[in-house]
Amino acid sequence: MPSSVSAFIGLGSNLSDPPQQVRRAIDKIQHLDCCSLEQCSSLYETPPMGPQDQPNYINAVVKIKTSLSPYELLGTLQCLENQQGRTRDKGRWGARTLDLDILLYDTLVSQDPTLTLPHPGLPFRSFVLYPLFEIDKNLNIPTFGAIQTLLERLEDEPPKVVR
C-alpha cells in the first residue's frame, strides 16, 4: 500500500442478525486491498436513535490504515453496505442491515455536505465514543477535543458490551 493514513470507521446494524452483520463487515474491511485493519472494538448494544419502534443496534468501531482518499473510502464503504442488503429508503433514523460511517480520517476537518469530518454526531453518541475510547484512550479528535472529556460530558449510560 502506498502512503496511508489512519481512519476510524463506525459500524452499526439492527436488522438480519446484527452481530453477524457487523462481524461480516469487519471481515470484509479486513480483506480490502486498500486497507489494513489496525484495531477493532468490542460490540456494543444500544437503543435506536430517533423512532423507538425498531430493534436495538449493535455497534463497533474499527481503526484502519488506508491508501484511499476520504471520498474513495466513502464509496468503498457504501459498496460494502449495499453488499449486505442496505437500502436507503427507510429515512435518516430507520432500521438498517448495516451502517458504515467514517468517523475520523487522519486529522482531516471537512465541512463538505457529502462527507463531514470528523463525523458531526461523534461527540454526542455513546455508541461511538465508548468503542473509540476502547481503541485509543488518548485520542484527540479535531475540533472536538480529548475523547475522555467528551465521555465525561455524555449524559447517556454506557452501552452494553456484547462481545
Image (tube, grey):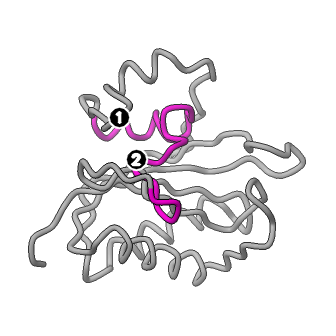
Mark 2 and mark 1 in contact? Answer it, CB < 8 Å. Answer: yes
**The N terminus sits in image quarter:** bottom left
In the image, 101 versus 23, the foreground residue is 101
Q: Residue furthest front?
A: 112
Q: Residue at x 24, y 57 (%)?
A: 38
Would you name the residue on which mark 1 appears? 143
Q: Amino acid at mark 2?
A: Pro
Bin the neighbour count of mark 2 within 10 Å (Cα to Cα): few under 14, some 14-19, many 20 and up: many
Q: Position of residue 47 (x, y in %)?
A: 73, 40
Residue 115 in the magenta stretch? The answer is yes
In the image, which residues are magenta? Answer: 112-136
Figure quadrant of residue 150: top left
Query: What residue is drawn where x is 55% and y is 41%?
Result: 121
Residue farthest toward the right in the current orientation of the protein:
53
**What residue did someone put label 2 on?**
118
* Residue at point 64%, 59% (across, down): 13
- 79 over 145 or under it: above or below: below
